[in-house]
Image (cartoon, helix red, strand yellow):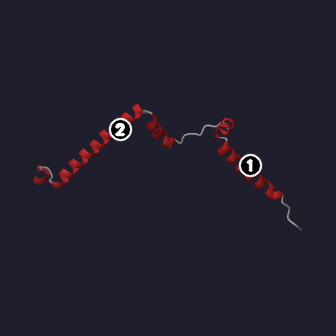
Amino acid sequence: MRPTLAPHVPVRLALAVGAAETRLHQHFPRIMRTLIRFSPARAAPFAELQRLETDPAFRALFRAELSACIVQNAEAAVTELQHAIRPDSEERAA
């Protein structure tokens, strides 16, 4: 018995529709944006990054906080290193 093409028709149809959609997106992007109305949801991890890129006030605040955090961590590291190199006099007496 010869196999029929019926099971393959939906697959071929889906591939043809996908190819047509891709072609339409390439040649008529404005029309396709109008026809297909959807807003891509922003991924939560990248929402703050996008805000940093677009909002100058938020970017300035973020940079100031980041700089303060870096300075604070550097000072803590220097203090820890100084205590490791030469301990306080109280620790030497013990």
Residue shown at 78%/53% (left/top)? 10
Q: Which residue is at the front of the view, 58 or 91?
A: 58
Q: Nearer the viewer, residue 90 or 33?
A: 33
Q: Is residue 9 left or right of residue 66?
A: right
| Mark closest to the chain's N terminus, 1 or 2 | 1
CA gap between label 1 and label 2 equals 48 Å
In the picture shown, does residue 14 fall above or below 50?
A: below
Residue 94 visible to the viewer: no
Between 49 and 78, the one nearer to me in the picture: 49
Q: Secondary structure at mark 2?
A: helix
Q: Amino acid at mark 2?
A: Arg
Residue located at (67% from left, 35% from top): 34
Identify which amino acid the numbered label 1 is placed on: Val
Q: Is residue 57 visible?
A: yes
Residue drawn at (41%, 33%) of the image: 56
Vertical side of 32 occupied by 88: above or below: below
* Percent of width and height locating residue 60: 37, 34
Q: Quadrant of the N terminus?
A: bottom right
Q: In percent of the image, x 30 and y 43: which residue is there?
A: 70
In the picture of the structure, the residue carrying the numbered disc 1 is: 17
Q: Mark 1: few, some, or many residues within 10 Å (few <14, many ≥20)?
A: few
Q: Considering depth in this image, is 83 or 43 the residue closer to the camera?
A: 43
Residue 11, quarter of picture: bottom right
Identify the element where label 1 is drawn. Answer: helix
Q: Which residue is mark 2?
A: 63
